[in-house]
Amino acid sequence: MVMLFTACGSQITDDVLEEIDPPQIDYIEDEDELEVEVMDQDVDDGQISSITDDMDDAEEPMDEEGAEEKGGPVTVDEELHELYLVDRNGMVAPQTMNMLMPEDKLTALVEHLVQEGPVTEQLPNGFQAVLPPETEVLGVKVKNGVATIDLNESFTDYHPSQEMQILQSITWTLTQEEEVDRVKLSINGEELAAMPQNDTPIGEGYTRGHGINLEVNDQADLVSTSPVVVYFLSQTDDQTYYVPVTRRVDQQDDLYEAVINELLEGPSYTSQLLTDFRQEVALIEEPDLDNGTLTLNFNEALLSQLQGTAISENVLNMLVLSLTEQEEIESVSLMVDSESAIMMSNGESLTEPVVRPNQVNVGQF
């Protein structure tokens, strides 16, 4: 399992697309791994390890039997949910929080994305909700996988530079729920064909396929390329969290190898993101998918910790989070020079496939 930390920092940037002078890619020095605790946990069949999060420190669910609304009892449960918030660098990133959830869960999730709303007291330092203050959620209806969110006119009071952040935040927050595949918006019951400020098309609904924290080259051929999501790191002081980024890769390339190549390429020069991969890391065989488990065989450069004998937990997490974005991949199995027994930097042995965590970037409660 993984304990993933939230970050602290300053306020968000207004325009994530603003070009800056390119610095060098920030690589974490060998042996100076970011502090993220990883623990192994076996599932029922005893065959698969997980980088799921340590919940021992979570508070016990609050007793809300006495809560009332409009004179009647309200059923409220405390659950962990990912909210996609904006960090100090203008990146949309998941933060897992413990929230009291009424029966109308989807409405509550959107309400937690409103600035000065119910999420305010729980916001990690450096993070901000995306919807303008005084935005009201008038209702959320789901039909055939499409969630239509009805908002009041205050929703339109956002800065134009934040339009993509808002769309991505709402979409990625709601589509974590099994019944939601895409998101539509309406204002006072009137459905929007495009966003109010920059006219970003919504069409038949916004999906995760539209991407998050988009890095699209002006010369990219959208017809012959496909989007992939890869996860990099962001760090403030001694805290780290994982940030998803969408890039486009050639459709003729092996998809899984393309994802790995994007990870090895590292974060954009214009971002503040980090990587824990050494520059010498390379695959020595093509990825092999068998019954939901993707097997990867790397060279010895993958072992960057404990004097070149262990794998970084951050590298493991970045691989698993990025590759399991592909629906057909359920777990990832690693090999180094065809050896399957790999030591992790916490001293544990990694001998079984690793599955995706239920939540990403779980903070302290």
Image (cartoon, rainbow, N blue to C red):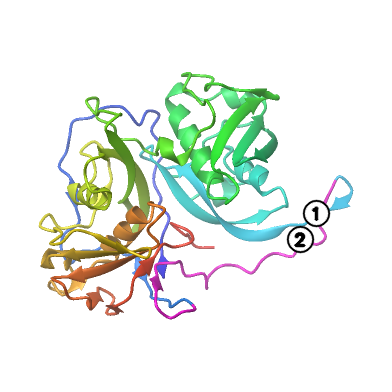
At 45% across and 41% down in the image, what residue appears?
A: 208
| Circle 1 SS class | loop
Say which of 287 and 343 sits in front.
Answer: 287
| Circle 2 SS class | loop
Q: In which quarter of the image is residue 133?
A: top right
Say which of 43 and 6 sits in front.
Answer: 43
Drawn side of residue 71 relative to residue 79, left or right: right
- Please tell me whether residue 272 is drawn above or below residue 351 in the rendered image: above
Drawn side of residue 101 relative to residue 353, left or right: right
Label 2 neighbourhood size at 10 Å, few (<14), some (14-19), many (20+)? some
- Is residue 212 among what the camera can see? yes
Q: In which quarter of the image is the N terminus?
A: bottom left
- Contact? badges 2 and 1 (CB < 8 Å): yes
Q: What amino acid is at disc 2? A: Glu
Task: Pinpoint residue 214: horizontal percent, then vertical percent.
Answer: 34, 35
Tell me which numbered mark, 2 or 1, is placed earlier along the sequence: 2
User: How many numbered circles does the render carry?
Assistant: 2
Is residue 61 part of the magenta span, yes or no?
yes
Say which of 108 and 333 sits in front.
Answer: 333
Drawn side of residue 364 relative to residue 228, left or right: right
- Is residue 240 among what the camera can see? no
Residue identifier under label 1 = 74
Distance of mark 2 from mark 1, alpha carbons? 8 Å
Drawn side of residue 298 relative to residue 38, left or right: left
Of badges 2 and 1, the one in the foreground is 1
Q: Quadrant of the C terminus?
A: bottom right
Is residue 302 part of the magenta span, yes or no?
no
Q: What stretch is highlighted in magenta?
A: 44-69
Residue identifier under label 2 = 64
